[in-house]
Image (cartoon, helix red, strand yellow):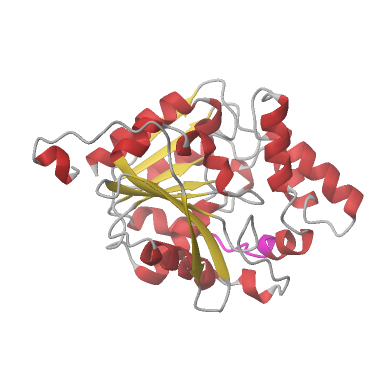
Amino acid sequence: MPIDKMLGLRRPRLERVTVEKLQVATPDGLTIAAYAWGNPQGREIVFMHGYSQCYLSWRRQIEDLDLADEFRMVAYDLRGHGGSSQPVDRELYKHDKVWADDLKAVIDAAGMKKPVLVAWSYAGRIVADYVKAYGQDGIAGVNYVAASTKADRKFMGPGIKYVIEMASDDIATSVRAARMFVHACFAGRPAGEEMDTTLGYTQLVPAKIRSAMMERTRDTGDVLPQLKVPVLASHGSMDRIFLAAASRHVAEVTPGAKLSIYDGVGHTPFFEDPNRFNRELAEFVRAT
């Protein structure tokens, strides 16, 4: 509980969210763009986006005044994405440890002590990378969101083909696949401006980087049964990228994990049903 509430004090109600940009150095010399906001004394949350996305994926969480009033939050652009360094050397993306190091560097740079990790899609792998490299003592819990945790075709939806085609070195193929991927992320069709924004940052990631990321094929599902922190698995019932069975698997094999299925929602429950997502996230973080 924030110290002001413990003392019975009331903080002024936020009227707008102020986001601070952090430039975070990684051990291998890259720069990670991170974005911090919220209550400096609140419980901590780190948002981790998916393949070929950026921190703006979480814009409906960033603009939520209730979340910002209660929690200290950071979202960051994965290496090769958004405002982070984008070297095309494949070796800088293939190894599990670099993804763990990036997350650790962001947590440290933000001065966080024990955040809850919110891991969407590809970022489910990064949770495993972090736990294997640094253990679980530094995290308070994990909210897997439509996450990739196990390399199994039975968890992959028809839209996964666009993920593969986006890594093509043929520009026409890659551009078309990116457009189809963005459409496949939603059960419905967002308003034109929202769709344009999402497609815009999706296209920021070079195909060579996408291709290098695809080489990380090792199964990370062995981490789930070892998790001792609270876990929430959130998933849309109409997800066409990773089927809801992926989160059901997380709930089945992870001790004490809770499952939340969003009926009629696609790969982005935090965007398609932000009110419910933000409420459930807040409840989960408070309970950790």
State the predominant SS element of the stretch in magenta. loop
Count up the numbered dots: 0
Q: Which residues are magenta?
A: 213-219
Res. 192 image quadrant: top right
Q: Is residue 49 above or below residue 26?
A: above
Q: Residue furthest bottom?
A: 28
Q: What residue is at 29 percent from the left and 33 percent from the top?
A: 283
Q: What residue is at 43 percent from the left and 32 percent from the top?
A: 64
Note whether residue 158 is visible: no
- Within the magenta stretch, is there residue 216? yes
Q: Position of residue 275 (x, y in %)?
A: 43, 24
Left or right, 150 with reference to 279: right
Of the pair 122 and 197, the residue shown nearer to us: 197
Q: Position of residue 234 (x, y in %)?
A: 45, 35
Of the pair 154 and 142, the residue shown nearer to us: 142
Res. 128 image quadrant: bottom left
Left or right, 130 with reference to 189: left
- Within the magenta stretch, is there residue 91? no
Q: Position of residue 258 (x, y in %)?
A: 34, 36
Query: If the image is split into quadrants, where does the N terminus sit?
Result: top left
Q: Residue furthest left?
A: 7
Of the pair 39 and 57, the residue shown nearer to us: 39
Res. 218 image quadrant: bottom right
Q: Position of residue 43 (x, y in %)?
A: 27, 47
Note whether residue 51 is visible: yes
Query: If the image is split into quadrants, where does the C terminus sit?
Result: top left
